Image (cartoon, coloured by chain):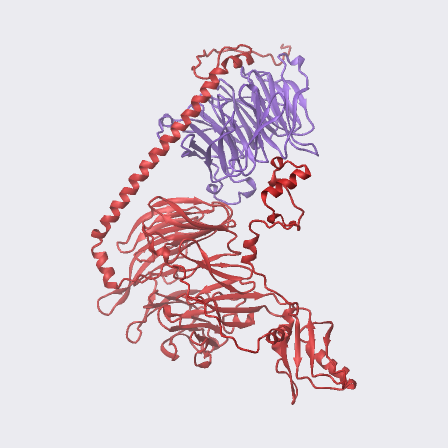
Chain colours: A purple, B red
Amino acid sequence: MRPILMKGHERPLTFLKYSREGDLLFSCAKDHTPTVWFADDGERLGTYRGHNGAVWCCDVSRDSTRLVTGSADQSVKLWDVQTGTQLYTFNFNSPARSVDFSVGDKLVVITTDPFMGNPSTIQVKRIARDPADQTSDSVLTIKGPQGRINRAVWGPLNKTIISAGEDSIIRIWDAETGNLLKETDKESGHQKTISSLCMSADKSHFLTGSADKSAKLWDSRSLTLLKTYQMDRPVNAVAISPLLDHVVIGGGQEAVNVTMTDRRAGKFEAKFYHKILQDEIGGVKGHFGPINALAFNPDGRSFSSGGEDGYVRLHHFDPEYFSIRM
Amino acid sequence: MAAAALSMPEIENKAMNLGIDLSTIDFDNIVLPPGDDFGINSDDEDILHEEEAPEFETGYGNVIVVDNLPVVSPEKFAKLEGVIRKIYSQTGVIKEGGLWMPVNPDTNMTLGYCFIEFNTAQEAKEAKEKTDGYKLDKSHIFVVDMFDDIDRYMNVPDEWTPAEIKPYEAGDHLQHWLTDEKARDQFVIRAGTVTEIFWNDARQVRPDPVYQRQYWTDSFVQWSPLGTYLATVHRQGAAVWGGKSTFNRIHRFPHNQVKHIDFSPGERFLVTYSSQEPSNPRDTHRVVLNIFDLGTGKLMRDFRGSVDDFTTGGSGGLSGISWPIFKWGGGKEDKYFARIGKNAIYVYETETFILVDKKSYKVDNVVDFSWSPTDSILALFVPELGGGNQPARVSLVQMPGKVELRQKNLFSVSDCKMYWQSNGEYLAVKVDRYTKTKKSTYTGFELFRIKERDIPIEVLELDNKNDKIIAFAWEPKGHRFAVIHGDGPRPDVSFYSMKTGGITARVSKLTTLKAKQANALYWSPAGRFIVLAGLKGFNGQLEFYNVDDLETMATGEHFMCTDIEWDPTGRYVATAVTSVHEMENGFHIWSFNGKLLYRIPKDHFFQFQWRPRPPSLLSPEKEEEISRNLRKYSKKYEAEDQDVSLALSEQDRKKRRSLQEEWETWTARWKQYHEEERELRLQLRDGEASDDEGSQEQYEAKEVEAEEVLDVHEEIVD
């Protein structure tokens, strides 16, 4: 498996997202320009210029026409995927951390960081069919719990919003009323900051990664803990294979702790685990820095990882990968 | 209010009266104001009181009574007071109004004693030590006592009552861990605030927990040399634990601020050490050493003094102490202990706890000594003196007679190190000598055969004399030793044997392994096998080597490994990364032949220690017989091994199957939900038909050419 190294960002990667067809790969980084690549050969297609701060997250609509990006410049922007023009800017008074389109792409859930005395919020915006009709009104605002919310995504049928963040608790909110429906308890939940959250393709379960060196798999309706994957390093990024019963978990020592000369010390490896048996399958090395973002191609035949080192590495699996027996 | 005394119905009544619905109260969220518990004892408070019975201080610890003063009239009162003040302000600060000399109201004469209150109890103690017996003049010799002592002795009843003889209580079975059916070994680990003890269950390829406790020790834990006790160290002193099923406290050894502890090899005594920051920065640290009897918990002897008295090294003097200060000699009977001082070695015997022959053993300029592990023989090293006029010397001295058994003079020596073989059969002295130019040093070995007549000495030099010695280790109970030597980044490892060449045994080299990534040697306690380890700079390279067959059995790596320890039987090796750095903390367990059995990551991993075993009770002949008929004995165990491994794989299969089944029930439910919600989902997508799940969507790849006019520019070309 020879990776394709995609160098287009000048700063650490923050997020990766494939389009539904799996032909495009969108990447966000701490430099200000999200980039779109051909997911097959890693050729750079174009960039989305306009943000004035680190871009933390993005999502692409089902028909691959709209891109939404959340940035530390306190704005969320809506883009035309094909032309790269800005369609609309939602302004906030604190950095936007995560964005996620609902099923049907009519709504988007946005989280903002606690900043200058403002608490963190989860906000739902309606996306107009015609950008000319777009307004900045929030359909729903949830004044968040303590600490930063690192990720908020839609639950099944857009009925719930699932959020996770610095307080290490996963919460399920009612997407209509904003009421808190469920939250994880101390025993089963994470012990430290949750850095990432990834939904399965059918939204039935999701995977969270945390600085407590573990990743956990949850039922997205009942919030039951299904599996725990124990790592030996803090987890920054997680992804669920849509094809096989595999999950991929990435991370590494925090940049501040990486003082050793040997790159093995940092454990900047993407680790594959068997989703059901919780056993380690293997690892993919290569990054020279912690892995910040992971994404599976929707066909499950390739995946890409984005690192603190500024590279996106695109991996097409060898045929042997599909015949691994545990 | 004593809430604990109320019964449940009473509480309910009370709550009713106050209009509180008890069922709605979350008791965990009630926070009492700090420092006030409303008389409610928390669950662990009883234990707390029981554990830490506080020492009662009367508050007079800083007061001394000086007796035998002259009896003076009021005219001379001020003068006497001045004299006393002058004497005692040398030793400490007398509190304001802290000097009180009582006067007989009838005669107006002083009573011949006075009370002095110092700022601290420590100063008072020092004053007592220094001035007790102070001669003011011929007829007035001070008798100084602590006020508390007088108080205490006053309370001694005048009539003697016979001590109550307690009925005999059977003690706990302290050796119980040796009776393990599977003959496993135990180890203790410390990670974070938790201390845990495990069985090393190599068959099940995992550790089996025995006991765990949070905040068990304040700094470290230590097994006694035969494994009977586990010692913990606290602010108030040390404690030893042991027992059959759980670890019960067997004795406490009070010693404030104890820093180091050391067991005697035969587990008869425990030495504790503390050093105290002086109140006056010009003074040196005060050192207190206590020797306790492990069996009874009684204090046998204490040593006090300034840190200078206990630093080793003769004329040069080293800063700080090297632990242990007392080295134990005389084999497992713990007959003697000794420490080095200036120009002398102080050898004490444990019958009476006084110096052997009531005086120290004078050796001018002695800088280092060590005991034979089995006999009461001391090896001493005296460096060169007078610019080479008097040669350096290594001598062997028999105790208690102080008879010099053997002596060897050495010339142009820069340093010496002594290594005893574990049976006390051989002593290797590593000698660093100056070259002729005195610019560099080279190393040789002097090998003493202690058990042979006249103790013959052999000189061994390495093939390349200029090689630096990186490590040296005797084979336990054996006749071989290993040396890592070399200058470069990949040194060589050589093995030597003391038993070659027929009747008159000679030392000779067995083999040299070239260019190894190793800087530490770990022999198996049973001999024969050795781990060549590359710690620190070599990132934890391990090589498992068989010295009988002179072949490498396996190589491995425990990345960033800091500590290596063989289990007491020589069956397993533990490699650990302790909290020297933050990453990779945890330990690995290997078989003796280098197969990685299991690994346990633990954050903030501080300590790994195997529980030692007492020496085997089998006679050498019996052991010989067993090893000859090994096949017969091993059959039984091999069958057991196979059973276990079959059971394990069966267990594994079962577990996998159940996991798979469990998962399938989950996914079945999800699929059902998913089907049910299909309509709703379609609605959300405005009736868009394709639902990705399930059916593999077919799509057509179409090449679309898009043209975009970026700029139109007209230019006239002529």
Q: Is residue B11 above or below residue B473?
A: above
> Front-most of B590 and B211?
B211
> Front-most of B70 and A217?
B70
Q: Does residue B692 appear in the picture of this structure?
A: no
Q: Is residue B532 left or right of residue A307?
A: left
Residue depicted at 49% across the width and 34% down the height: A215
Res. B124 image quadrant = bottom right
Q: Is residue B144 above or below residue B231?
A: below
How far from the left and from the top, in percent, is residue B209? Answer: 41, 48
Q: Does residue A235 appear in the picture of this structure?
A: yes
How far from the left and from the top, in percent, is residue A209? Answer: 51, 33
Q: Quadrant of the C terminus of chain B?
A: top right
- Give the number of marks: 0
Query: Which residue sits furthest right?
Result: B75
How far from the left and from the top, in percent, is residue A129? Answer: 62, 12
Res. B133 image quadrant = bottom right
How far from the left and from the top, in percent, is residue B185? Answer: 36, 53
Q: Is residue B183 above or below residue B348?
A: above
